Image: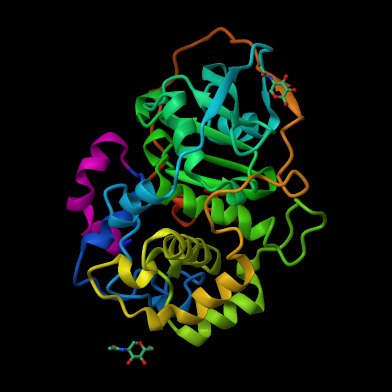
Amino acid sequence: MAVLKSLSSVLAAAALIVPGVLGFQLAPRDAISNDAYPFCNPATDNECILNGKYLFPTLEFSLESSLGNAAFLQYLPTSTFSLTQWTNNKMPQACYHWGAEYYKFNPREFIMYNVTFADCPQPFVVCYHSKAQKTITQIATEISRIPVKLRQSTTAYLAFSDLQVDNPAYTDYIAAWSPDGIIMGRAQAYFPAALIHEVTHSMDRSILSPTKPNPWGFGTSFSESSTWISAENADGYAIAAYGTKSHVENFAEAGRAVMLDAVYPGGLAAFTGNNPNLTQISNQLSTFKAAAASYYVTGGTCDLAVKFPYPTVLVDIPPATPTITAGPTATATPYGQCEFILLFLFSPLSRCDSG
Ligand SMILES: *[C@@H]1O[C@H](CO)[C@@H](O)[C@H](O)[C@H]1NC(C)=O
Ligand SMILES: *[C@@H]1O[C@H](CO)[C@@H](O)[C@H](O)[C@H]1NC(C)=O
């Protein structure tokens, strides 16, 4: 938390819109040149890995304005798609659970779309919040940049409004929940660097899972396997500052690095001008590639034997209930309440339950 507070001036612009969006804690760090270890303090956070040490200077791939995001925009091609809007007054159960029950958006403010990309005959579903600051076409275009070999680990996307006034309870940024094959985030987080991180969470526990129970299903995370943890320990540095938060987050950061390595001309070594010592993460990159390189490529088509199935469990969108009394003005989730699960969050959502 001390680190966060020291960044408060950097975060001021974001905080004006959405106070407590800890999701921004990662992003500005790439722009700070004399950053000190640890980002994640092992004395106060027992999830921290590698004593909070990470590759420094960093690979600049976090912010939407970063070199890495620009590279993804340039080298991850879009796929064409068609949109069809649902008219049955239903939504996928997973969208209802995460969007309405968990994040407290009004379920009646979502519009469901089938999005059928040219590289996959089975549609994906976007549960689109009607006040989101990007159009459904913009959201679908960003999703289309996720290479289909990765995108097939998902089935649905929730796109929320960025404005706190539209849902005071929502202060997260973007998250993945691989058992539902779902990625959920605010409109402003729909950019390729964030999506590659999130879809890596999906891959981690589905297609790459060492214990997946069927071709597409989820099991334990690859990032929690001794194979991955040994590679981290052999290197001694996390891939990025945010990666020090946990094995799971570090793996998702590795997904970005490997994706860039695959698409950037000359690979990671040619990518950045700030001379990170890539030897410090070489075991992780090679271990990641040994498990996943065939998916971290552009082009091709989905494999329906592997793709997360189209959502078939649907719920009726409940009718509006009359407001009986005007309660006290709603307030945001207290700052820091869910700090461990934010931003490019993945698995331990239950940590938030007590918050
Ligand atoms: C959406 O796609 C599913 C699966 O292909 C299909 O059953 C359904 O009719 C489609 N709905 C719309 C509105 O296109
Ligand atoms: C790069 O990192 C490796 C592994 O930690 C280390 O052995 C090497 O000395 C570093 N090179 C430079 C130039 O700092």
- From what the image shows, is residue 93 above or below residue 279? above
Q: Position of residue 33 (x, y in %)?
A: 19, 69
Q: Residue at 70% of width from left, 30% of height from top?
A: 93
Q: How many marks?
A: 0
7 part of magenta stretch: yes
Residue 61 appears in view: yes
Q: Residue at 56% of width from left, 31% of height from top?
A: 99
- From what the image shows, is residue 40 above or below residue 115? below
Q: Position of residue 216 (x, y in %)?
A: 75, 51
- Compare residues 269 and 253 and report the one nearer the observer: 269
9 part of magenta stretch: yes
Instruction: Please report the bounds of the magenta region as a residue range.
Output: 3-19
Would residue 110 be found to the left or right of residue 54 on screen? right
Q: Position of residue 185 (x, y in %)?
A: 47, 39
| Magenta stretch secondary structure, dominant | helix
Q: Position of residue 197 (x, y in %)?
A: 48, 54
Residue 342 appears in view: no
In the picture, the quarter occupied by the N terminus is bottom left
- From what the image shows, is residue 263 above or below residue 234? above
- Compare residues 307 and 213 and report the one nearer the observer: 307
Q: Residue at 58% of width from left, 83% of height from top?
A: 230
Q: Quadrant of ligand 2?
A: bottom left
